[in-house]
Structure formats: C-alpha cells, structure tokens
Image (cartoon, coloured by chain):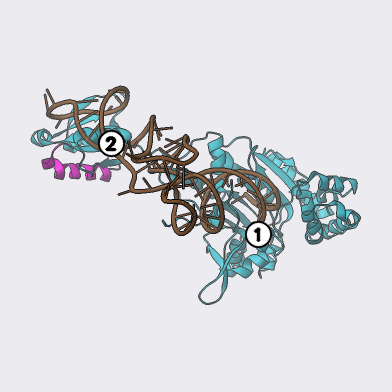
Chain colours: A cyan, B brown
Amino acid sequence: MEIQRPRGTVDLLPGEVEVWQALESAVRDVLDRANYGEIRTPIFEHTELFERGVGETTDIVSKEMYTFLDRGNRSVTLRPEGTAGAVRAFVENKLYGTGALAKLYYIGPMFRYEKPQKGRLRQFHQYGAEVLGSELPAVDAEVIALSLSVLQRLGLKQLNVELNSVGCSVCRPVHRAQMIERLLPHRDELCRDCQVRLEKNPLRLFDCKNESCQAVLREANVPYIVDVLCGECKDHFEQVQGYLEAMDVPYKIEKSLVRGLDYYTRTAWEITTPGFSTIAGGGRYNGLVEELGGPSTPGIGFAGGIERAIAVLAAQNVQIGRTVELDAFVAVADQVAEHTAMAVLTSLRRLGLRADRDYQGRSLKSQFKLADRLQARFVIVIGESELASGKATVKQLATGAQREIPFAELADAIEQAGSEW
RNA sequence: GUGAGUGUGGCGAAGGGGUUAACGCACCGGAUUGUGGUUCCGGCAUUCGUGGGUUCGAAUCCCAUCACUCACCCCA
C-alpha cells in the first residue's frame, strides 16, 4: 500500500504555504518591534521536563504526550507546548545572569497525541512569547496586547480578549479549600469528570460545560476565584486592567476562565472569536522557573495556534500572503533558440524577476496556454526570426499588445511596464 | 479514549451483485503556416482505500484493517 502521512499530520503545499509565511512574518514583525528575540529550542525534550513543567495532572501530560524511548533508553517527548522548553533554555543558558529581562518568542511545531478533528492535529503549530524576570502588571498588559496585536495585524476581526485571574499560592489554596468544603456534600450531583476535578484541581470545575454542574456550583454558592483573591493578587489584577484601558486594549472579565495548565498564576486570558475554539491563550507563571531548577523568577507568556488563525482568516475571507504570478514566461519557438532562451531566462532571474519557461517540449501554442495558466504578465517569444533580428517578441497577456524588444533591454522593459504598454 | 459517518480517475460525483465503471471540472492533444483566455473535436480509471471472505460472477454483500470527517473530552 502507498505510504501515507502519519495520522493527524498535514502536508502544506505550494499555494497554501504562502499564507503560513505571511503569518510567520507578521508574528516576527509584531514581536520584533516589541524587542522580543526569537528562541529555537529542541522539538523533543526529556519527558521529565513536561511532567514537571506542565503538570502531571494536566490532560496534556496524563494522556496526550508523544513519548517514546530513544536508542539509549531515555524517555523523550515531542514538545506539546512551547513554554516548558523556553523556560528550560532560559535556566540552562542562564539568561537570568545578565539581569536583563528575557523577552523571547518562538514559532514551530508542537505535538499532542490526540484523536484528530476540526482544529486539532497531532502535529500542529504555535507561535508564542514569554517574558521572564518581571512581575509588574505592566508586563502582563504588554503581553496581552501583543497576543492580540498579532491577530489584528493579520487583519482578523471580532477578536475578544477574555481575562481572568487565577490567584497565587496564597489565595488559591484558600479558595480551593472553600470549594471542596462546599461541594463535597454535593459530590454525587456532579458529572464524573467533575468529581475527579474536585479532587485534583477544583478550579477546573468552572470549565465544565455541563449545565447541571454549573447549577451545583451556583447552589453551593461557590465563589469565583477572582472574587476572593488575596490583596496582592487583587491589586495586581486591577492594575493590569488599568494598563489595558490606558492602552486601549478591549477585554472582558471572564470569571469562569481557567486555563488547563497547572503552572498559571494570577493573570490568565484567551483570545476567542465567534464560531471557533480559542485561537490564542496565555497566562502568568510565577513559580515555573523555580520549579524547573532556576532562580525564583516570575514569568508570563502566551501561545497562539497557527492552524486556527489560518482557519479564521479563511472564514473571515482575509487574504494574506504573496501571489505567485510570473513576471515573464519565455517561449521557445524553435529549437535553434534554445541557448538564447536559456540565457534570457537566466538574465531575467538575475535581475530579480520571477520568470519561467516550458520544459516539457510543448508546442508554441501550448506554451502560451501554460503562460496564461501561470498568470504570466509577459510572454517572451524567441525563435528563428528573433535570433536573426536580435529582438525578442514580447506580448503582454492582459492586453494582447505585442512588441519587439532587443534582448539586452528585456528586463528593463518588463520591470517598467505599466498597465498601458 | 468513547460514539457516529465516509472512502470510486488530479478534484467533485453517479452506480447498492451480471458483458466496455455515468457525468462535470481540471489536464493533454488537435481545429493548415510561430501566439493564450471563448467555442468545437478527440484523449484521459484492466479498476472502485487496503487485505481477506461469500458467490458461477462483487465497486456493489460480509469481516478486518487503514485513513478522513464530525461530536464528546480537552485544548492551539
């Protein structure tokens, strides 16, 4: 049987990859202007990094990792997200040593062993940014604004920033105890998933889409974490909002927003658009660097899904990416013109024009058809008579206008050609 | 991981046991001399995801397998 690509992967072909390139340059451009530097970390890491960094109770670690043993019997894992690797690199390369803030971004493939469906693949791609070394709320505001800017830059509309705070090591345990205390008597009324959540990570109960579970939460009078933050978290959250308002970044508080990764503290947000799952999300992670063996360093970051952004682009009919029409197509009308044609073709390319020719021995007529299909602006015909006169026959396809132009002047003529030729 | 649906040429899509597997698009060639986009003519699946089974006979029935799609879970 024909070998097929592994499940949950895709081939990106010419014609669609241009959109990716445009998206990637938008990411680079937006983040570069904010003085973030690109970091490229390995696509696989020791499994332990994700177990410790992402959290053993998360779905990602407990059931979605692409883990295998290498030939040296080491357990390695294809990275399921970008933050753990970036933070590991920050620690390992002692980027904290300079005392400067580390502002990093990345773009690349991520892997999660899941059953593929709409907007979910086993190899998918994310771009993301991390700031390590500041806990000031202004940084939260910057990162949130940037996560939105990238998508706005692409021309996307109807983007919503959903914002929340999930507290810290001071207020979270208090809230957690409260939840357990109030919900334990109603344990049986919760769905199976929520019963497990109640034990492992009660906060995630707010995430349940099951209406009956939400009803239980209401009846038990369980407070949202954002309503019972400790003084410092509350102050931080308010300041973040103040900055966002000053920066004119629209947002709405989403009290039930809880992100799936264990490492988040305080600020958490997602960017959504109607009709799609989350297209980008982020949060603060003040304990992660220390957890991974570095000095206590606050951090915050976000990640966006490239496939998802592209899906939204398509849905909103936004065109990005270069077009690939040809500046010139060189048609060979006669065998004797082969060498001259190749010389002309090469010289056009050297001068920066996009040019091509036929390599399948087509008739002149077919060569014109091909040129038309390739959306060539000009067809340069070279045959016996052109050789004799030293001038190529040049036809502008859009208008049908045709001229004789000396070989040496071809590139200039084409480059400078306007619409009325 | 659970559930449902689908799988026929490059793409879309008929055919639901009986000699040559519709059709549309795309593609290739041609319509007298070296010229495209329209039109006309011609060509283009020893084969119906793969493997096995039932049958005199299968793309059509059965089993398995793979892949895709969608939903749940969760997220990007």
| Residue at position x 54%, y 65% in the image | A44
Which is the main secondary structure of the residues drawn in magenta?
Answer: helix
Q: Is residue A413 visible?
A: no
The three-letter code of the residue at mark 2 reads Leu
Which percent across, then down, holds residue A370? Answer: 28, 36
Q: Nearer the viewer, residue B23 or A294?
A: B23
Q: Which residue is mark 1?
A: A60
Reply yes or no: does residue A349 show up in magenta: yes
Left/right placement of residue A158 relative to residue A413 reads: right
Q: Nearer the viewer, residue A158 or A419?
A: A158
| Residue at position x 23%, y 45% in the image | A346
Callout 1: SS: helix
Q: CA distance from mark 1 to mark 2?
A: 49 Å
Callout 2: SS: helix
Disc 1: host chain: A
The three-letter code of the residue at mark 1 reads Ile
Which percent across, then down, holds residue A329? Answer: 26, 37
Left/right placement of residue A377 relative to residue A171 reads: left
For residue A99, which numbered disc appears in the image? Answer: none
Q: Is residue A114 visible?
A: yes
Q: Which residues are magenta?
A: A333-351
Q: Which residue is mark 2?
A: A370
Relative to residue A193, is residue A47 depicted above or below?
below
